[in-house]
Image (cartoon, rainbow, N blue to C red):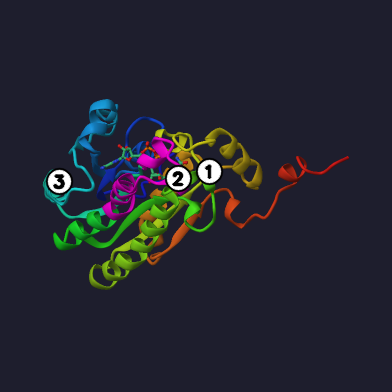
Amino acid sequence: MSYNLLKGKRGIIFGALDPNSIAWKTAERVHEEGGTFVLTNAPIAMRMGQINELAEKTGSQIIPADATSIEDLENLVAQSMEILGGKLDFVLHSIGMSINVRKGKHYTDQNYEWTQKGTDVSAMSFHKVMQTLYKADAMNEWGSIVALTYMAAQRVFPDYNDMADNKAYLESIARSFGYFFGKDKKVRVNTISQSPTPTTAGQGVKGFDGFIAYADRMSPLGNATALDCANYTVTLFSDLTKRVTLQNLFNDGGFSNMGVSDSVMAEFVKE
Ligand SMILES: NC(=O)c1ccc[n+]([C@@H]2O[C@H](COP(=O)([O-])OP(=O)(O)OC[C@H]3O[C@@H](n4cnc5c(N)ncnc54)[C@H](O)[C@@H]3O)[C@@H](O)[C@H]2O)c1
C-alpha cells in the first residue's frame, strides 16, 4: 500500500546489501511512497551483493562509497544532487560492522585495530556522512536523517561485543550533530533502535538464533521485521514528523520496556 508520503523527495540510502538488508526494504518502501534516491554501499560489498537488482527495480543509480572515506562521501553527495536534480530531503545510514564480532574475538580480548576499524565504520562514519552533507549544504530545510541502532547501546547484551559501544557512540553523534543540523539547517536527526533482524550483519552475532527467539517472546507485539523498520523510517522521512529530532526511537515490539513476559517466565516456573 502506498500513501504517497515521500512524493517529490530525494535522498541517499546507504547499506543495501541483499534483500534481507533493512536498507533494501527501506529503498523498496521509499520508492513505493514516491521518493527518489541514490543507492550506495562500500565498493567491496557491491561486488558481492545484488544491489543492481534493487537499482533496476527502483529506477535508482548506484554510487559506490566507503563510508569511512571523506573523499568518497564528498563525491557521493555531489553526484547525488546532480543525478537527483537538487538538494536532498532524506538520508538513511544503515551501516554496521565489527571485525571482533566477525572473527569471534571476545569482548575481554579485543584486537584494538579491529575495534578501531569497527568504530570508524559503524559510528564515526555517521559523523562523516553528516559533516559532508552539512559542509556541502546538501540538505533541504525540513529534511530528515536516520541511522539504525540497537538497544545494546543502553543495556548489556554480552555477545554484541564492541558493537554495543559503537552503537552508544552512534546515538550520541545523532544528538550532537542533530543539534547543529536542526539549529542551522532545520534538518532532523534520529536513530531507530530496531529488534534483532535476520540480516547478514545480524546473523553475524554469536547465538543470534536463540537471541531473536528470546526477544520475540519478550515483546508484547513480537519482533519488528525489516519491513516494519522500513515503514517506520518512511514516517520519519515524511512531513508528518517534522519536529521529531535528537531521538533514539525504539522499533522493537515493546521489548525495551519489558522486565519479563509470561512466555519467558513459563520456562522458569517449576510445577
Ligand atoms: N540485523 C539486526 O539484528 C539489527 C538490529 C538493530 C540494528 N541493526 C543495524 O541496522 C543496520 C543495517 O544492518 P542490517 O541488519 O540490514 O545488515 P546488512 O549486513 O544487510 O547491512 C550492513 C551494511 O553495512 C555496509 N557497510 C559495511 N561497511 C561499510 C563501509 N565501510 N561503507 C559503507 N557501507 C558499509 C554493508 O555493506 C552492508 O550493506 C546496521 O547499522 C545494523 O547495526 C541491525
State yes or no: Cβ of the residue under disc 3 lies below 8 Å from any atom of ligand 1. no
**67 shown above or below 188:** above
**Residue stretch rendered in magenta on the structure:** 98-125
Circles 2 and 1, Cβ within 8 Å, touching? The answer is yes
Q: Residue at x 56, y 42 (%)?
A: 223
Between 106 and 265, the one lying in front of the other is 106
Please tell me whether mark 2 sits on a helix, a strand or a loop: helix
Q: Mark 3: which amino acid?
A: Asp
Residue 220 percent across, percent down from the top left: 65, 48
Q: CA distance from mark 1 to mark 3?
A: 33 Å
Q: Quadrant of ligand 1?
A: top left
Outermost residue toward the bottom in this view: 183
State yes or no: Cβ of the residue under disc 2 lies below 8 Å from any atom of ligand 1. yes
The disc, 1 or 3, on the residue closer to the chain's N-terminal end is: 3
Please tell me whether mark 1 sits on a helix, a strand or a loop: loop
Quadrant for the N terminus in the image: top left
Q: CA distance from mark 2 to mark 3?
A: 27 Å
Q: Which residue in the protein does label 1 denote?
A: 224
**167 shown above or below 103:** below
Q: Residue at x 24, y 28 (%)?
A: 52
Q: Which mark is residue 229?
A: 2
Please tell me whether mark 3 sits on a helix, a strand or a loop: helix
The disc, 2 or 1, on the residue closer to the chain's N-terminal end is: 1
